[in-house]
Image: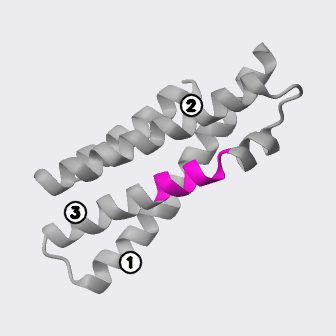
Amino acid sequence: MNGDSTLAALVLVAILAAATGPAAADDTSEMWRTADAYIACGRAYVKAADIPTLEGAKSACAKELDAYGLAMRTLALNTQTAEGRSPDAARSFAAMKEAWARKDALDSFAYSVKQWIEEK
């Protein structure tokens, strides 16, 4: 599985775990948008850099990873709240979900960037 499809699969898992409804749909759209922006940033970095590196790509795309993490946190928090969890439990779960999502997104991003660098 390549990095793009891995990230897409991770996002799909998060969507399937989310509650349905207008707020969740908006949160899910934002999560997809930020995930796509993160991968697009990595591609753009590799294409534009004379000598692209993984560390350079991570640095260039850090704000996109932050946006994705925030989108995942928001989706998880709103989902947990809609399911009736206490505010503390919802915040705790959302923080855990954000950390998990950031790690998995970074792993997928690194895999894709390494492939693009090799292909360049």
Q: Residues within 10 Å of mark 3 (few under 14, many from 20)?
A: many
Q: Earlier in the sequence, mark 2 or mark 3?
A: 2
Q: CA distance from mark 1 to mark 3?
A: 13 Å
Please say if the residues under marks 1 and 3 sit with CB atoms less than 8 Å apart: no
The one of 8 and 70 positioned closer to us in this rendering: 70
- Main SS of residues in magenta: helix
User: What residue is drawn where x is 76% and y is 25%?
Assistant: 48
Determine if residue 103 is in view.
no
Residue farthest toward the top in the current orientation of the protein: 119
Q: Is residue 27 above or below residue 3?
A: below
Q: Is residue 55 a member of the stretch shown in magenta?
A: no
Give the residue type that dot 3 points to. Thr
Determine if residue 74 is in view.
yes
Q: Is residue 67 a member of the stretch shown in magenta?
A: yes
User: What residue is drawn where x is 50% and y is 32%?
Assistant: 6
User: What residue is drawn where x is 64% and y is 27%?
Assistant: 43
Q: Which residues are magenta?
A: 61-69
Circle 3 residue = 79
Q: Is residue 109 above or below residue 101?
A: above
The quadrant of the picture occupied by the C terminus is top right
Helix, strand, or loop for circle 3?
A: helix
Q: How is the image coloured?
A: one colour
Please provide percent x and percent y for residue 36: 47, 35
User: What residue is drawn where x is 37% and y is 40%?
Assistant: 32
